């Protein structure tokens, strides 16, 4: 595996594979790799001729400078893990390479970015995501890009971005990887105190509580949501939000007649975590990624 730090180098490295018609896969990351990242890399390795993993802590998607400063950075460890999987290129540009002096362009996706994470972190968060992902797609030119279901809203935003701008890349959303107690893997988990780590498992219990209620016949989202809130409060967690929303538009649903997405965000100590789970009236074994998210979303 080769580590590349400039746009010119990554384009040069991919020139011949593209001429030969090889499939290029991209896994965009901010580093501090865990099994969730590695599962995306393995999927890309199984499906693509050439695998590129980008490692870039994107400052434009952080609304809190302290959060940016505290974000874990483990470049040598990350390179070792990616190399062991068989990644071909680790693209790790400096901030100045991605945002050179005088940079003045923002890519904004309307409709999906004002709610949930956009409401709590600010619309600028998704503007930062959309801008850096567009740049990465232009820098690397992948045929396929891999994202995790844990960031479901981000995945929908990127699908809309790709559709609206006619970008020639297929977006593949892969299942969330979890700890044995259900906690979704995240680079932020390492910042949890032992007590907060134990309480964090309640996020998944709350999501499961919704599925249990729906499996038992509940179709009204309000009682199902109350069951989830009870599970959170039993662990002394007050969520920023817990909603049942459309897998297409992220709008709150009035009735659970088909697939919906349960989404949650909460602070545990100084660490903010998010999670989600696909809810279906008749659960299908191993259904972990919303089927409606596998196609370009309709207009919000």
Image (tube, rainbow, N blue to C red):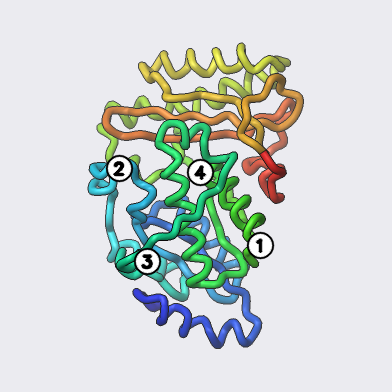
Spatial CA distance of label 1 from label 4 is 22 Å
Q: Element at badge 4?
A: helix
Tag 1 and tag 3, C-beta contact below 8 Å: no
Lower sequence index among marks 3 and 2: 3
Residue 108 in the image: state x and y as whole percent.
Answer: 51, 50
Q: Which residue corresponds to mark 1?
A: 166
Give me the residue at 45% from left, 33% from top. 181
> Which circle, 2 or 4, is nearer the viewer?
4
Spatial CA distance of label 2 from label 4 is 18 Å
Lower sequence index among marks 1 and 4: 4
> Which circle, 3 or 2, is nearer the viewer?
3
Give me the residue at 29% from left, 41% from top. 64
Q: Which residue corresponds to mark 2?
A: 190
Tag 1 and tag 2, C-beta contact below 8 Å: no
Spatial CA distance of label 3 from label 4 is 23 Å
Q: Residue 151 carries which label?
A: 4
Lower sequence index among marks 1 and 3: 3
Residue 279 in the image: state x and y as whole percent.
Answer: 65, 30
Residue 202 in the image: state x and y as whole percent.
Answer: 44, 24
Lower sequence index among marks 3 and 4: 3
């Amino acid at each position: 595996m080769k580590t590349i730090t400039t746009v010119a180098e990554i384009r040069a490295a991919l020139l011949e594979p593209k001429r030969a018609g090889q499939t290029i896969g991209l896994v965009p990351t901010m580093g501090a790799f865990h099994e969730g990242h590695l599962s995306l890399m393995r999927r890309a390795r199984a499906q693509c001729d050439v695998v590129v993993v980008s490692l870039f802590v994107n400052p434009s998607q952080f609304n809190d400078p302290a959060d940016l400063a505290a974000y874990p950075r483990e470049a040598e460890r990350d390179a070792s893990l990616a190399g062991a999987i068989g990644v071909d290129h680790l693209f790790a540009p400096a901030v100045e390479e991605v945002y050179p002096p005088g940079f003045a362009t923002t890519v904004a996706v309307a409709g999906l970015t004002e709610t949930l994470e956009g409401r709590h972190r600010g619309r600028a968060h998704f503007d930062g995501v959309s801008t850096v992902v567009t740049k990465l797609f232009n820098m690397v030119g992948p045929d396929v890009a891999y994202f995790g279901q844990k960031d479901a809203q981000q995945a929908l935003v990127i699908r809309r971005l790709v559709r609206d701008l006619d970008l020639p890349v297929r977006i593949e959303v892969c299942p969330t990887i979890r700890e044995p107690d259900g906690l979704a893997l995240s680079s932020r988990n390492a910042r949890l105190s032992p007590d907060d780590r134990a309480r964090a498992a309640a996020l998944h219990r709350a999501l499961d509580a919704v599925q249990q209620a729906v499996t038992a016949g509940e179709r009204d989202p309000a009682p199902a949501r109350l069951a989830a809130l009870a599970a959170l409060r039993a662990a002394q967690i007050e969520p920023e939000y817990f909603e049942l929303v459309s897998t297409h538009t992220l709008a709150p649903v009035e009735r659970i007649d088909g697939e919906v997405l349960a989404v949650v965000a909460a602070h545990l100590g100084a660490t903010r975590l998010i999670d989600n789970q696909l809810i279906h009236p008749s659960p299908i074994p191993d259904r972990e990624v919303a089927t409606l998210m596998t196609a370009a979303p309709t207009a919000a």
